[in-house]
Amino acid sequence: MGSRGSQLALWQANHISSLLRARGHQVDIEIIKTTGDIITGVALAKVGTKGMFTKEIEDALADGRVDLAVHSLKDLPTELPPGFELAAVTRREPPNDVLLSVKYPGIADLPRGARLGTSSLRRQAQLMTLRPDLEIHPLRGNVDTRIRKLEEGSYDAIILAAAGLNRLGRTELVRQVIPTESMCPAAGQGALGIEIRAGDTTMREALQFLDDRDARSTTACERALLRSLGGGCQVPIGAIATVAGGLLTLQAVVARPDGSRILRQTQSGKDPEALGAKVGELLLREGADEILREVYGETKAPQRS
Protein backbone atom coordinates (compact mmCIF):
# COMPACT_ATOMS: atom_id res chain seq x y z
CA MET A 1 0.00 0.00 0.00
CA GLY A 2 1.31 3.44 -0.94
CA SER A 3 0.68 6.36 1.41
CA ARG A 4 1.93 9.82 2.15
CA GLY A 5 3.94 10.10 5.35
CA SER A 6 1.85 12.61 7.26
CA GLN A 7 0.28 11.61 10.55
CA LEU A 8 -3.21 11.70 9.05
CA ALA A 9 -2.23 9.83 5.87
CA LEU A 10 -0.61 7.10 7.95
CA TRP A 11 -3.68 6.85 10.20
CA GLN A 12 -5.77 6.35 7.07
CA ALA A 13 -3.36 3.78 5.63
CA ASN A 14 -3.18 1.86 8.91
CA HIS A 15 -6.97 1.95 9.25
CA ILE A 16 -7.49 0.38 5.83
CA SER A 17 -4.61 -2.04 6.45
CA SER A 18 -6.21 -3.29 9.67
CA LEU A 19 -9.50 -3.92 7.87
CA LEU A 20 -7.69 -5.87 5.15
CA ARG A 21 -5.60 -7.83 7.66
CA ALA A 22 -8.80 -8.80 9.50
CA ARG A 23 -9.79 -10.55 6.24
CA GLY A 24 -6.54 -12.46 6.08
CA HIS A 25 -4.47 -10.22 3.80
CA GLN A 26 -0.83 -9.36 4.44
CA VAL A 27 -0.30 -5.63 4.02
CA ASP A 28 2.86 -3.54 4.01
CA ILE A 29 2.83 0.26 3.83
CA GLU A 30 5.33 2.17 1.70
CA ILE A 31 5.66 5.88 2.52
CA ILE A 32 5.94 8.04 -0.60
CA LYS A 33 6.74 11.76 -0.63
CA THR A 34 4.56 13.82 -2.96
CA THR A 35 5.00 17.27 -4.48
CA GLY A 36 2.54 18.67 -1.93
CA ASP A 37 4.66 17.27 0.90
CA ILE A 38 7.90 18.70 -0.49
CA ILE A 39 6.63 22.22 -1.27
CA THR A 40 5.58 23.43 2.18
CA GLY A 41 6.52 27.12 2.17
CA VAL A 42 3.96 28.15 -0.47
CA ALA A 43 0.18 28.38 -0.27
CA LEU A 44 -1.34 25.36 -2.00
CA ALA A 45 -3.33 27.50 -4.40
CA LYS A 46 -0.10 29.02 -5.72
CA VAL A 47 1.52 25.65 -6.41
CA GLY A 48 -1.20 24.89 -8.97
CA THR A 49 -0.23 21.30 -9.82
CA LYS A 50 -3.06 18.81 -10.23
CA GLY A 51 -2.31 15.64 -8.37
CA MET A 52 0.18 17.37 -6.06
CA PHE A 53 -0.64 14.84 -3.33
CA THR A 54 -1.11 11.81 -5.57
CA LYS A 55 1.14 11.76 -8.66
CA GLU A 56 4.22 10.16 -7.07
CA ILE A 57 2.02 7.50 -5.47
CA GLU A 58 0.44 6.78 -8.86
CA ASP A 59 3.94 6.44 -10.34
CA ALA A 60 4.66 3.75 -7.72
CA LEU A 61 1.37 2.04 -8.63
CA ALA A 62 2.21 2.11 -12.33
CA ASP A 63 5.68 0.67 -11.66
CA GLY A 64 4.22 -2.16 -9.57
CA ARG A 65 6.00 -1.04 -6.39
CA VAL A 66 2.63 -0.80 -4.65
CA ASP A 67 -0.72 -2.47 -5.39
CA LEU A 68 -3.10 0.10 -3.94
CA ALA A 69 -3.07 3.66 -2.64
CA VAL A 70 -5.21 5.26 0.07
CA HIS A 71 -6.01 8.93 -0.52
CA SER A 72 -8.13 11.59 1.10
CA LEU A 73 -10.66 11.68 -1.74
CA LYS A 74 -10.66 15.48 -1.85
CA ASP A 75 -6.96 15.33 -2.87
CA LEU A 76 -7.59 12.97 -5.79
CA PRO A 77 -8.03 14.70 -9.18
CA THR A 78 -11.49 14.22 -10.67
CA GLU A 79 -10.00 12.69 -13.82
CA LEU A 80 -7.77 9.74 -12.98
CA PRO A 81 -4.91 9.26 -15.44
CA PRO A 82 -5.19 6.32 -17.86
CA GLY A 83 -4.25 3.07 -16.20
CA PHE A 84 -5.88 3.70 -12.81
CA GLU A 85 -9.29 3.20 -11.24
CA LEU A 86 -11.06 4.05 -8.00
CA ALA A 87 -11.72 0.66 -6.42
CA ALA A 88 -13.51 1.87 -3.28
CA VAL A 89 -14.87 4.95 -1.57
CA THR A 90 -15.14 4.37 2.16
CA ARG A 91 -18.01 5.26 4.45
CA ARG A 92 -17.86 8.98 4.97
CA GLU A 93 -16.97 10.94 8.07
CA PRO A 94 -18.94 14.20 8.62
CA PRO A 95 -17.82 16.44 5.72
CA ASN A 96 -18.06 19.74 7.64
CA ASP A 97 -15.29 22.22 8.25
CA VAL A 98 -14.73 23.20 11.89
CA LEU A 99 -13.38 26.27 13.67
CA LEU A 100 -10.65 25.75 16.26
CA SER A 101 -9.75 28.43 18.77
CA VAL A 102 -8.24 28.80 22.21
CA LYS A 103 -10.42 31.79 23.16
CA TYR A 104 -13.43 32.15 20.87
CA PRO A 105 -16.53 29.92 20.58
CA GLY A 106 -17.39 30.59 16.93
CA ILE A 107 -16.92 32.64 13.76
CA ALA A 108 -19.45 35.24 14.91
CA ASP A 109 -17.53 35.73 18.17
CA LEU A 110 -14.16 36.56 16.63
CA PRO A 111 -13.16 40.20 17.18
CA ARG A 112 -12.79 42.56 14.22
CA GLY A 113 -9.46 42.03 12.50
CA ALA A 114 -8.90 38.64 14.11
CA ARG A 115 -6.16 36.49 12.54
CA LEU A 116 -7.63 33.37 11.00
CA GLY A 117 -5.44 30.64 9.52
CA THR A 118 -6.27 28.73 6.34
CA SER A 119 -4.52 28.08 3.03
CA SER A 120 -7.75 27.03 1.31
CA LEU A 121 -9.20 29.52 -1.20
CA ARG A 122 -12.56 27.75 -0.78
CA ARG A 123 -12.60 28.39 2.97
CA GLN A 124 -11.21 31.90 2.60
CA ALA A 125 -13.83 32.92 0.04
CA GLN A 126 -16.76 31.72 2.14
CA LEU A 127 -15.28 33.19 5.33
CA MET A 128 -14.95 36.58 3.68
CA THR A 129 -18.65 36.56 2.79
CA LEU A 130 -19.45 35.88 6.46
CA ARG A 131 -16.81 38.11 8.08
CA PRO A 132 -15.08 40.45 5.60
CA ASP A 133 -13.33 42.16 8.53
CA LEU A 134 -11.19 39.12 9.37
CA GLU A 135 -7.51 38.86 8.43
CA ILE A 136 -6.85 35.60 6.58
CA HIS A 137 -3.31 34.25 6.90
CA PRO A 138 -1.70 31.18 5.27
CA LEU A 139 -1.56 27.97 7.30
CA ARG A 140 0.40 24.91 6.12
CA GLY A 141 1.73 21.83 7.86
CA ASN A 142 0.27 18.67 9.34
CA VAL A 143 -2.59 18.72 11.85
CA ASP A 144 -0.31 18.80 14.91
CA THR A 145 1.74 21.68 13.45
CA ARG A 146 -1.37 23.72 12.68
CA ILE A 147 -2.83 23.18 16.15
CA ARG A 148 0.50 24.05 17.77
CA LYS A 149 0.64 27.35 15.83
CA LEU A 150 -2.87 28.14 17.10
CA GLU A 151 -1.92 27.31 20.69
CA GLU A 152 1.22 29.47 20.44
CA GLY A 153 -0.92 32.47 19.51
CA SER A 154 0.01 32.85 15.85
CA TYR A 155 -3.72 32.79 15.03
CA ASP A 156 -6.95 33.64 16.85
CA ALA A 157 -8.63 30.73 15.08
CA ILE A 158 -7.99 28.19 12.33
CA ILE A 159 -10.29 26.13 10.13
CA LEU A 160 -9.75 22.44 9.40
CA ALA A 161 -11.83 19.51 8.19
CA ALA A 162 -13.74 17.69 10.92
CA ALA A 163 -12.89 14.30 9.44
CA GLY A 164 -9.14 14.51 9.94
CA LEU A 165 -9.47 15.77 13.50
CA ASN A 166 -11.96 13.03 14.36
CA ARG A 167 -9.65 10.36 12.92
CA LEU A 168 -6.65 11.63 14.90
CA GLY A 169 -8.59 12.31 18.09
CA ARG A 170 -7.53 15.98 18.03
CA THR A 171 -10.91 17.62 18.65
CA GLU A 172 -10.04 19.36 21.94
CA LEU A 173 -9.93 22.86 20.42
CA VAL A 174 -12.94 22.48 18.10
CA ARG A 175 -15.31 25.28 19.02
CA GLN A 176 -17.79 25.25 16.12
CA VAL A 177 -18.92 22.70 13.56
CA ILE A 178 -19.64 25.04 10.66
CA PRO A 179 -22.94 24.24 8.88
CA THR A 180 -22.50 23.30 5.24
CA GLU A 181 -24.94 26.10 4.35
CA SER A 182 -22.37 28.60 5.72
CA MET A 183 -19.25 26.83 4.50
CA CYS A 184 -19.72 24.34 1.69
CA PRO A 185 -17.06 21.60 2.00
CA ALA A 186 -14.56 20.46 -0.62
CA ALA A 187 -15.78 17.79 -3.04
CA GLY A 188 -15.15 14.40 -1.47
CA GLN A 189 -14.29 15.79 1.97
CA GLY A 190 -14.59 13.15 4.69
CA ALA A 191 -14.21 10.13 2.38
CA LEU A 192 -11.19 7.99 1.56
CA GLY A 193 -10.56 6.84 -2.00
CA ILE A 194 -8.66 3.64 -2.70
CA GLU A 195 -6.89 3.67 -6.07
CA ILE A 196 -5.56 0.63 -7.95
CA ARG A 197 -4.21 -0.20 -11.41
CA ALA A 198 -7.03 -0.39 -13.93
CA GLY A 199 -8.11 -3.94 -14.61
CA ASP A 200 -6.59 -5.42 -11.44
CA THR A 201 -9.58 -7.65 -10.72
CA THR A 202 -7.91 -9.45 -7.79
CA MET A 203 -7.31 -6.19 -5.96
CA ARG A 204 -10.72 -4.80 -6.90
CA GLU A 205 -12.48 -7.86 -5.47
CA ALA A 206 -10.38 -7.73 -2.28
CA LEU A 207 -11.39 -4.10 -1.71
CA GLN A 208 -15.07 -4.41 -2.65
CA PHE A 209 -16.19 -4.72 0.99
CA LEU A 210 -14.84 -1.20 1.69
CA ASP A 211 -16.95 0.50 -1.00
CA ASP A 212 -19.86 2.40 0.56
CA ARG A 213 -22.81 2.94 -1.78
CA ASP A 214 -23.91 6.32 -0.39
CA ALA A 215 -20.35 7.65 -0.17
CA ARG A 216 -19.69 6.48 -3.74
CA SER A 217 -22.79 8.23 -5.16
CA THR A 218 -22.50 11.49 -3.20
CA THR A 219 -18.80 11.93 -3.92
CA ALA A 220 -19.26 10.97 -7.59
CA CYS A 221 -21.84 13.75 -7.81
CA GLU A 222 -19.54 16.29 -6.16
CA ARG A 223 -16.58 15.28 -8.31
CA ALA A 224 -18.72 15.53 -11.47
CA LEU A 225 -19.57 19.10 -10.45
CA LEU A 226 -15.88 19.90 -9.95
CA ARG A 227 -15.00 18.29 -13.28
CA SER A 228 -17.64 20.30 -15.12
CA LEU A 229 -16.12 23.51 -13.74
CA GLY A 230 -12.57 22.45 -14.61
CA GLY A 231 -11.56 22.89 -10.98
CA GLY A 232 -9.00 21.11 -8.83
CA CYS A 233 -8.81 20.81 -5.07
CA GLN A 234 -7.26 24.28 -4.62
CA VAL A 235 -9.91 26.50 -6.19
CA PRO A 236 -12.81 28.31 -4.45
CA ILE A 237 -15.42 25.65 -5.23
CA GLY A 238 -17.49 23.87 -2.60
CA ALA A 239 -19.78 20.89 -3.19
CA ILE A 240 -21.75 18.65 -0.86
CA ALA A 241 -24.27 16.01 -1.90
CA THR A 242 -26.67 14.14 0.37
CA VAL A 243 -28.88 11.16 -0.40
CA ALA A 244 -32.33 10.34 0.99
CA GLY A 245 -34.84 7.87 -0.40
CA GLY A 246 -32.73 7.31 -3.50
CA LEU A 247 -32.73 11.04 -4.34
CA LEU A 248 -29.52 13.04 -4.37
CA THR A 249 -29.41 16.72 -3.44
CA LEU A 250 -26.31 18.70 -4.40
CA GLN A 251 -25.47 22.13 -3.06
CA ALA A 252 -22.50 23.91 -4.60
CA VAL A 253 -20.68 27.21 -4.26
CA VAL A 254 -18.23 29.16 -6.40
CA ALA A 255 -16.85 32.36 -4.87
CA ARG A 256 -14.25 35.03 -5.37
CA PRO A 257 -11.40 34.59 -2.87
CA ASP A 258 -12.12 38.04 -1.40
CA GLY A 259 -15.78 37.09 -0.81
CA SER A 260 -17.09 39.92 -2.98
CA ARG A 261 -19.15 37.56 -5.13
CA ILE A 262 -20.56 34.15 -4.31
CA LEU A 263 -22.67 31.90 -6.53
CA ARG A 264 -24.84 29.15 -5.03
CA GLN A 265 -26.89 26.35 -6.56
CA THR A 266 -28.93 23.52 -5.05
CA GLN A 267 -30.54 20.85 -7.24
CA SER A 268 -31.83 17.30 -6.83
CA GLY A 269 -31.73 14.25 -9.07
CA LYS A 270 -31.13 10.50 -9.21
CA ASP A 271 -28.05 10.23 -11.44
CA PRO A 272 -24.88 11.42 -9.64
CA GLU A 273 -22.88 12.32 -12.75
CA ALA A 274 -25.80 14.03 -14.50
CA LEU A 275 -26.70 16.04 -11.39
CA GLY A 276 -23.12 17.21 -10.89
CA ALA A 277 -22.82 18.25 -14.53
CA LYS A 278 -26.19 20.05 -14.41
CA VAL A 279 -25.27 22.10 -11.33
CA GLY A 280 -21.90 22.91 -12.89
CA GLU A 281 -23.61 24.17 -16.03
CA LEU A 282 -26.00 26.34 -14.00
CA LEU A 283 -23.08 27.89 -12.11
CA LEU A 284 -21.21 28.55 -15.35
CA ARG A 285 -24.28 30.34 -16.73
CA GLU A 286 -24.31 32.53 -13.61
CA GLY A 287 -20.68 33.55 -14.15
CA ALA A 288 -18.56 30.88 -12.42
CA ASP A 289 -16.23 30.77 -15.43
CA GLU A 290 -15.40 34.46 -14.91
CA ILE A 291 -14.57 33.89 -11.23
CA LEU A 292 -12.40 30.86 -12.00
CA ARG A 293 -10.57 32.68 -14.81
CA GLU A 294 -9.73 35.43 -12.33
CA VAL A 295 -8.39 32.84 -9.88
CA TYR A 296 -6.32 31.08 -12.54
CA GLY A 297 -5.00 34.46 -13.66
CA GLU A 298 -3.61 35.04 -10.16
CA THR A 299 -2.23 31.52 -9.69
CA LYS A 300 -0.62 28.96 -11.88
CA ALA A 301 -3.40 27.22 -13.83
CA PRO A 302 -3.76 23.59 -12.71
CA GLN A 303 -1.99 21.08 -14.89
CA ARG A 304 -0.72 17.59 -14.45
CA SER A 305 3.02 17.11 -14.82
Image: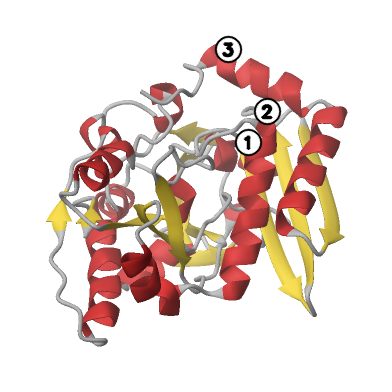
Residue marked by disc 1: 125
Distance Cα–Cα, label 3 vs label 2 = 12 Å
Q: Are marks 1 and 2 in contact (CB under 8 Å)?
A: yes
- Residue at the spot x=78%, y=50% of the render? 274
Whether residue 131 is visible here, answered yes or no, is no
Q: Is residue 277 left or right of residue 145?
A: right
- Residue at the spot x=23%, y=54% of the render? 3
In the image, residue 88 lies at what x, y percent?
Answer: 45, 66
Q: Amino acid at mark 3?
A: Gly
Labels 1 and 2: the sequence-earlier one? 1
In the image, residue 188 lies at what x, y percent?
Answer: 54, 55
Residue marked by disc 2: 256
Above or below for 186 versus 175: above
Residue marked by disc 3: 297
Q: How many marks?
A: 3
Q: Amino acid at mark 2?
A: Arg
Whether residue 146 is visible here, answered yes or no, is yes
